[in-house]
Image (cartoon, rainbow, N blue to C red):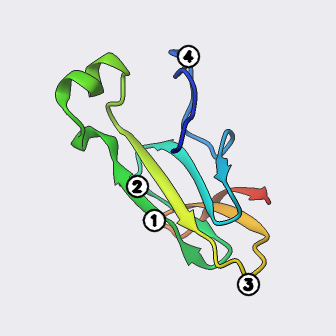
Amino acid sequence: MLTWGPIDPDRDFDRLEGYQGHGDTLIYGLINNAEELEVKVDDHKATILNLEALSPKVVNEYQLEDVSLWYFEKDPKSTYNQILLVDESTDEVVQTVDL
C-alpha cells in the first residue's frame, strides 16, 4: 500500500521536491501541469496519471485540479542517478534532483 500523508493545502507541486520511494523498485510524486512537463529518471520516462480521473468529489475535497501522479518502476539490477523535470515544448530541463 502506498501512502503519502495529509495533503498540505499550501503545497507546491510545481517542483520535484517531496518525491517518495516504495521499497527498492518504485519512485513516485505529485506534479502540477503535467501536460506541459515530463518526468524522467535518468533517460527513462516516468508514467504520469492525471488525478482528475478520480471522482469529482475526491478531486474537490483534496484540491487535485491540475495535479498528476508520476511514478517510475526501477529495475533492481540497474542504478539510477537523477530525476529530471523537463518542459515538453522546449526539451529544457527545468529541475534535476539527485537520487
**x, y (%) of residue 54?**
24, 38
Q: How far apart are marks 1 and 4 (CA)?
A: 26 Å
Q: What residue type is labelled 3?
A: Lys
Asked if marks 2 and 1 touch (Cβ < 8 Å), the reply is yes
Q: In this rendering, which labeled residue sits more in front, label 2 or label 4?
A: 4
Mark nearer the N terminus (2 vs 4): 4
Q: What residue type is labelled 2?
A: Glu
Residue name at image x 79 percent, y 70 percent? 81
Q: Which amino acid does label 1 sit on?
A: Glu
Q: Which of 36 and 64 is in front in this view?
A: 64
Q: Which amino acid does label 4 sit on?
A: Asp
Mark nearer the N terminus (3 vs 1): 3
**x, y (%) of residue 76?**
70, 77
Query: In the image, 3: left or right of 52?
Result: right
Q: Which of 24 and 91 is in front in this view?
A: 24
Query: In the image, 59: left or right of 14?
Result: left
Q: Mark 4 points at which residue?
A: 10
- In the rendered view, would you say 12 is above or below 28? above
Asked if marks 3 and 2 touch (Cβ < 8 Å), the reply is no
User: What is the number of the mark on residue 23?
Assistant: none
Residue name at image x 55 percent, y 36 percent? 3
